[in-house]
Amino acid sequence: MTDKLVIALAQMTQSVGDLKANADAMLAWRARAQGADLIVYPELQLIGYPPEDLVLKPALVDQANYQLDRLAQETADGGPAMLVGTVVASQGVLFNVVALLDNGAVTAIRQKRELPNYGTFDEKRLFAPGPLPAPIDFKGVKIGVPICEDIWFPFVTAHLRSEGAEILISPNGSPYEVDKDDRRLNAVAGTRVRETGLPLVYLNRVGGQDELVFDGASFVMNGDLTLAQQLPDWEEALVLTQWEKWDGQWVCLPGEQHDLDPRPADIYNAMVLGLRDYVNRNRFPGVVLGLSGGIDSALSAAVAVDALGPDRVWCVMMPSRFTSQDSLDDAVECARLLGVRYDTIPIEPAVTAFDTMLAPVFEGRQRDLTEENIQSRIRGVTLMALSNKYGHMLLTTGNKSEMSVGYATIYGDMAGGYSVLKDAYKTTVFDLCRWRNENVPSLGLGIGPEGPVMPERVITKPPSAELRDNQRDDDSLPPYEILDPILYGLVEEELSVDKLVERGFEKETVARIERLLYIAEYKRRQSPPGVKLGIRNFGRDRRYPITNGFRTI
């Protein structure tokens, strides 16, 4: 029985469904971890997370078995053993597992017990729950391996402790959410360590996967609740942690201590990483977006430049007769500050053509929202034409406040392949713009500009869609400092109108916003994917029926 261990933590990215690439990357990281006794990888690292219904394909499970055997054979060289997350089929059902690979063979498998089935997670759709796990014996040390959700339940870690576990190692696939660092560290890990008295390794992955972003931020907490290791957020990292047994208790020696991003730097980096991986992994040469001179498109362009570099971002101003000179000037200045390609394509010829085409059937009717939406749809068609011709992905620019109440044009400004602002309320957009004009995100260092990314007027002028004369957002909506707290209560907190009235909001206003929220569901179902930032994003988290007669008043 040993009294010293070296455990390598591989905080790495993934490629969902590309099992060979994942296995190759794991072997490459193992080669860098020579001197370690064991290298640990995140949850389901071999197949990628979340696999969704892809994991139901028998061919994928067969590939997983093949690649796991290949990885196991590599451990015959006497180097580090590997703790690998994968999927295993048994008696017609699938299990989310970790496998210990050592001395050329699969020496142990442990199944995930608690399957999350809320928010972004659908694991009960895919996997069967395993039994309460027993510790794995490794070099005479009993290691408990609660997989991700397992550490949120005290009886799982209590069982491992009762079975003789000496160290807890928890491989995770934990997506980013605002304020999640504290919940992981204190509410979950700290509580489990306090209950069991055992040191806990929390290993998470990094990278974007469709709407989810994984922020890493892995750590090791000793049995006395001290933080022995804190890995960085957003970046891959390989750390060899040193362990010694003192007076019968395993202790991780002090090591790296990285500061994690505060708000709103964490939100901004989540947007950068989500967009970067989505564009690159889907092999787009770059992105194209409409640059209106407004705050949403300015922020979207800045995120795109920080994610991809200015040479892969194409901004297009599409003025109409309602576009102000301020907007024209601000769009030019944004493009100059970002260093991107900038083109102007006036839409007035197309607007005139539509007016002429529709005149016979619109005769006798007043101009209204229809004509405003036609302008937005002309812009959508124009940008999609550029996307088709050149291959750039169309980046949409709408924010969560607009998407909540339907203040967006379906097949118009909602058209596109991805949105970085989809889960950002308008007040958050303002905060992010002010922050980015004064800071450079860690993921954008050496990629985006070091100075301001938009003129101050973009942030301070009243928001407007500029689809009619003298239009302002607050002509149709409450001011955002009122609208956003109401929306947060309705969406994130699921509060009733009366509960929000108790917070001081006007009943008529809240009832109107609730109605707009529900009737816009059909639009949101047809919106592009976007980065999840908060606890309840539209799409993966919040799933409401389109046809819905329920109201809270």
Image: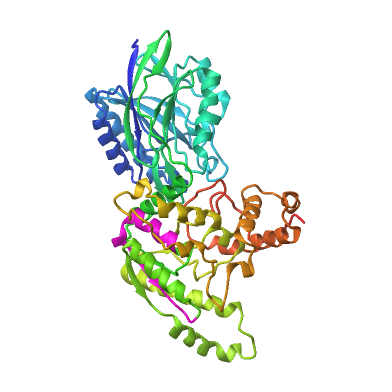
Foreground of the two, 324 or 25: 324
Instruction: In the displayed orientation, state which residue is furthest to the left.
Output: 77
Q: Is residue 68 above or below residue 519?
A: above
Q: Position of residue 125 (x, y in %)?
A: 54, 43
Q: Which residues are magenta?
A: 298-321
Q: Is residue 429 magenta?
A: no
Q: Is residue 196 above or below residue 550?
A: above
Does residue 384 appear in this view? Answer: no
Q: Decide if residue 510 is on the left or right side of residue 527.
A: right
Q: Quadrant of residue 416?
A: bottom left
Picture residue at 74% right of the left edge, 52% below the top: 501
Does residue 508 appear in this view? Answer: yes
Q: Position of residue 538 (x, y in %)?
A: 55, 54
Instruction: In the displayed orientation, state which residue is furthest to the top.
Output: 247
Q: Quadrant of residue 135?
A: top left
Picture residue at 41% right of the left edge, 75% below the top: 382
Q: Is residue 50 above or below residue 315?
A: above
Q: Quadrant of the C terminus?
A: bottom right
Foreground of the two, 26 or 260: 260
Q: Quadrant of the N terminus?
A: top left
Q: Position of residue 72 (x, y in %)?
A: 30, 29
